[in-house]
Amino acid sequence: MGESLLIRGEGDGALYLLYSPDGRHLASAGFDGAVKLWDPLTGKEVTTLGQAAGPVFNLAFSRDSQRLASATIRGVVELWDVGAGKERATFHGNLGSATLSPDGQRVAWSRVGGSVEIRDTESGRQLLEFPAHPAPVIWTSYSPDGKRLVTTSWDKTAKVWDASNGAEVLTLRGHTHVIQFAVFSPDGKRLATASWDHTAKVWDAATGKEIFPLRGHKDRVGMVAFSPDGKYLATASFDNTVKIWDGSTGKELRTLPRHAGYVGGVAFSPDSKRLATAGGYRGRWEIKIWDATRWEEKPKDP
């Protein structure tokens, strides 16, 4: 279906997107460091939570939508109180991608040397640290039940870990370039990865076997998202497009009309009825929100 809402701005913001689990907010962040909340129905800015300490490349909500974590390329992780609109805690020190456990009680982040650290969000106490990859870790993400973590790395692999003790559960191999992003499906049974080899892949989260590849982009794939109902997948690419795929078969259903620049963010609403995409180029950014109810109908070229 077509684009239903367009938000535009100047600068380098809104290159990463995430819906809050309750659907009330759409969070955005980008190279300008501003962490913003939007009303996804009207496109109006609700608040700017703050100015993060450097470009933000990662956001993560707690399941109750009350906490938001942001991670910057300068190695700083900040925790925000969404209701109060203020910062709760800041962690420093060569930190990378950060993710919140679904209950909001733990924050996990990667370190430059390839390890992963987990801390208590209230006390800041370290709970666990373990070596994850021989190369820098790019992304970390919790499973929906909070029992596992997935990490991606410059070493072209993704790994699944027991979040309670740091034991390695699975290694996913098959990409031929850096894996930038990974995410569990809403039911936790599958994983999706996005790579600089121009593809995304869907994996069995229990066995680590590849289920199907998503091929068709002409440049790096930076992000992939499952719709909460499991019917669709969306991929965001540096070729300035977003592609929609059948969640059961991996068949390409549609390529959305191009953004003005590369697409950095893609996120489904909790009810699976809308898809938000974000792109930017040369000091301009845009967020598009699409009707995601019937992607199979009347496909059109970008």
Image (cartoon, rainbow, N blue to C red):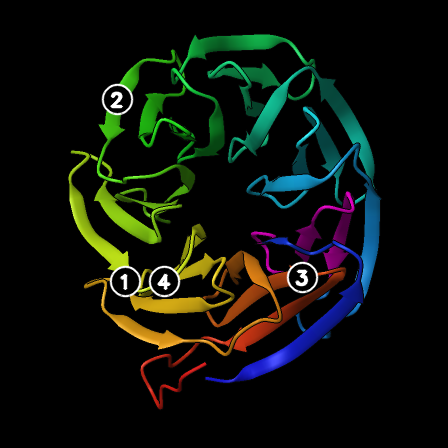
Vertical comparison of 34 with 108: above or below:
below
Above or below — where is 190 with respect to 234? above
Mark 1 residue crowding within 10 angstroms, few (<14) / some (14–19) / many (20+): some
Of mark 4 and mark 3, the one earlier in the sequence is: 4
Amino acid carrying label 1: it is: Gly
- Which residue is identified by label 2? 169
Question: Which residue lies under the disc numbered 3?
Answer: 281
**N-terminal label among 2 and 3:** 2
Of the residues under marks 2 and 1, which one precedes in the sequence? 2
Residue drawn at 50 percent across, 57 percent down = 238
Q: CA distance from mark 4 to mark 3?
A: 19 Å
First in sequence: mark 4 or mark 2? 2
Say what amino acid the circle numbered 4 marks: His
Q: Note whether residue 43 is visible.
A: no
Residue 18 position, x and y percent, is: 59, 52
Q: Residue at x 83, y 54 (%)?
A: 47
Identify the mark nearer the N-term, 1 or 4. Answer: 4
Residue 59 screen position, x and y as percent: 62, 42
Other residues around mark 4 within 10 Å, as few (<14) / some (14–19) / many (≥20): many
Where on the picture, by quarter, is residue 289?
Answer: bottom right
Type of amino acid at the residue the image marks with label 2: Val
CB contact under 8 Å: marks 1 and 4: no
The residue singled out by tag 1 in the image is: 247
Span of residues in magenta: 18-38
Q: Which x, y percent locates residue 282? A: 72, 60
